[in-house]
Amino acid sequence: MRKSHQVLLASVIGGSLLAASAGVYAQQAAAKPETLIKWRQSVFQVIGWTCGRVKLALEAAVYDKDEVIKAATALAAVSNSGIGSLFAAGTEQGKGWHDTATKPEFFAAGSKAGEIAGNLARETNELVKVANTSDVAAVKAQFGKVTATCKACHDDYRIKL
Ligand code: HEC
């Protein structure tokens, strides 16, 4: 194949890949409110699962460092994944897996809500770092900071079920 054809082909393939990924974003933006609410409730379920694993490991008679690294890494990945986009306009009310438990104040809080979500990402990133050491007391202290961010947000923005 001549070089100019290769370049052309590469740009066509590249172009269609770009178009395909733009399509994926458009699809996400156009996701039904019900789907977005399901996704955010599912994300928080995963967050709950991973936190539960760290808590169990910290309470166990024998500390399992690998288990804590696995759970903390998954927790940090989800916390850094852009959860804010799942609170798009139009999802203030409605049902995902169940009626949304997000208070209307969360949508009105703007940058303050983003700041609290940012705290979750920061503290979970730190948890991964500490989990990679063998300092169990430090893991416990950092896990306390993580759960304080959960509580701070839930106290203000989550409807008590
Ligand atoms: C920035 C705010 C915020 C932070 C931080 C936060 N949450 Fe939440 N959480 C919410 C909101 C809002 C809901 C309700 C979602 C809905 O129903 O629309 C929720 C729902 C949940 C649920 C219920 C999910 C379901 O089945 O509907 C669990 C479990 C949960 N959070 C755990 C946690 C844990 C554990 C942490 C900390 C590691 C945490 N959350 C941090 C705001 C937050």
Image: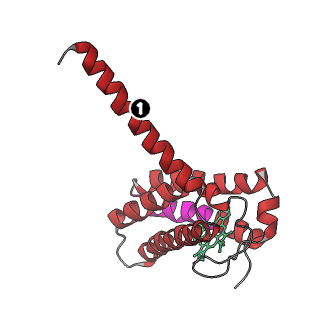
Q: Where's residue 132, x and y in %?
A: 39, 53
In magenta, the rendered stretch is 134-147
**What residue is drawn where x is 74% and y is 68%?**
92
Q: Residue furthest left?
A: 1
Viewer-closest of 159 and 58: 159
Could you tell me residue 60's position as x and y percent?
A: 40, 78
Residue 11 screen position, x and y as percent: 36, 25
Residue at left 55%, top 67%?
39
Q: Main secondary structure of the magenta part?
A: helix
Q: Quadrant of the N terminus?
A: top left
The one of 84 and 34 positioned closer to us in this rendering: 34
Q: Is residue 81 or residue 60 the one in the foreground?
A: 81
In the image: residue 117, left or right of residue 104: left
Q: Secondary structure at mark 1?
A: helix
Image height of 10 relative to 70, above or below: above
Label 1 crowding class (10 Å Cα cut-off): few <14, some 14-19, many 20+? Answer: few
Q: Does the magenta run of residues contain 80?
A: no
In-image side of 113 versus 126 (left or right):
right
Q: Circle 1 sits on which residue?
A: 15
Image spot of residue 115 (x, y percent): 72, 52
Relative to 150, residue 78 above or below: above
Left or right position of 161 against 68: right
Residue type pointed to by label 1:
Gly
Residue beneath the point at 53% across and 48% down: 25
Asked if one can make out residue 80 in the rendered structure from this viewpoint, the answer is no
Is 142 positioned to the left or the right of 11 in the image?
A: right
* Numbered label tally: 1
Q: Is residue 145 magenta?
A: yes
Quarter of the figure with residue 13 = top left
